[in-house]
Amino acid sequence: MAKRNQQRVRPAEQELKEKLVNLNRVAKVTKGGRTFSFAAVVVVGDGKGTIGHGLGKARDVSEAIQKGIDDAKKNLVKVPIVKGTIPHTQLGKYGAGKVLIKPASDGTGVIAGGAMRAVLEMAGIQNILAKSQGSSNPHNVVKATIDALKKLRSPEMIAKKRGISLDKVFNG
């Protein structure tokens, strides 16, 4: 198993934007009737390569979203971005959710479906081709996308690991 890019980030250090990916209303049936609660999947990012996801559950929508944001800030990771795209093609998997992300040339934009698009935009990636191949469940798609982003390795990381110069990574 390859060592992953698991560089953790402190949330207090940067300006984070948040995006609601999915809001689910859950009904619990009791003898007094139905009791509704909400589950919110939230993605936070700074648009410069830092991304995190969280799940918040509460009786109130705004409270669930706030809990999701707080949870997302607790598990931020850094993603390598090269010239507005990713360094290489990568597969990500979480549960039945499978995603494929590919680098794209300038001017392509973010070609991705709902939950994936939110993650990639929050990370600050401008040009990418992405395909969700497994489950369409937003929870698993978000986690699979972040898994794929965590697996990415920048050319600098590869050069350092192999003990060679950056020129040799591209030309050697």
Image (cartoon, rainbow, N blue to C red):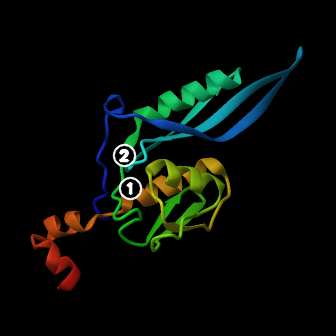
Q: Quadrant of residue 81?
A: bottom left
Q: Position of residue 84 (x, y in %)?
A: 40, 62
Mark 2 / mark 1, whichever is N-terminal: 2
Could you tell me which residue is drawn at 28 percent across and 60 percent down? 3
Identified at 57% across, 50% down, the residue is 118
Quick check: marks 2 and 1 in contact, CB under 8 Å? yes
Give how far across and how far down residue 156 sits, in percent: 20, 64
Residue shown at 45% from the left, 58% from the top: 125
Residue carrying label 2: 77
Question: Please, what is the three-letter code of the amino acid marked with disc 2?
Answer: Val
Q: Nearer the viewer, residue 165 or 140?
A: 165
Graded by Cα atoms within 10 Å as few (under 14), some (14 to 19) or many (20 or more), the crowding at tag 2 reads many
- Check disc 1 and report its element: helix, strand or loop: helix
Q: Quadrant of the C terminus?
A: bottom left
Work out which residue is located at the far bottom of the displayed protein and give it. 172
| Residue with the mark numbered 1 | 150
Q: On screen, 128 above or below 18? A: below
Residue 125 in the figure: left or right of residue 67:
left
Nearest the eye: 113 or 64: 113
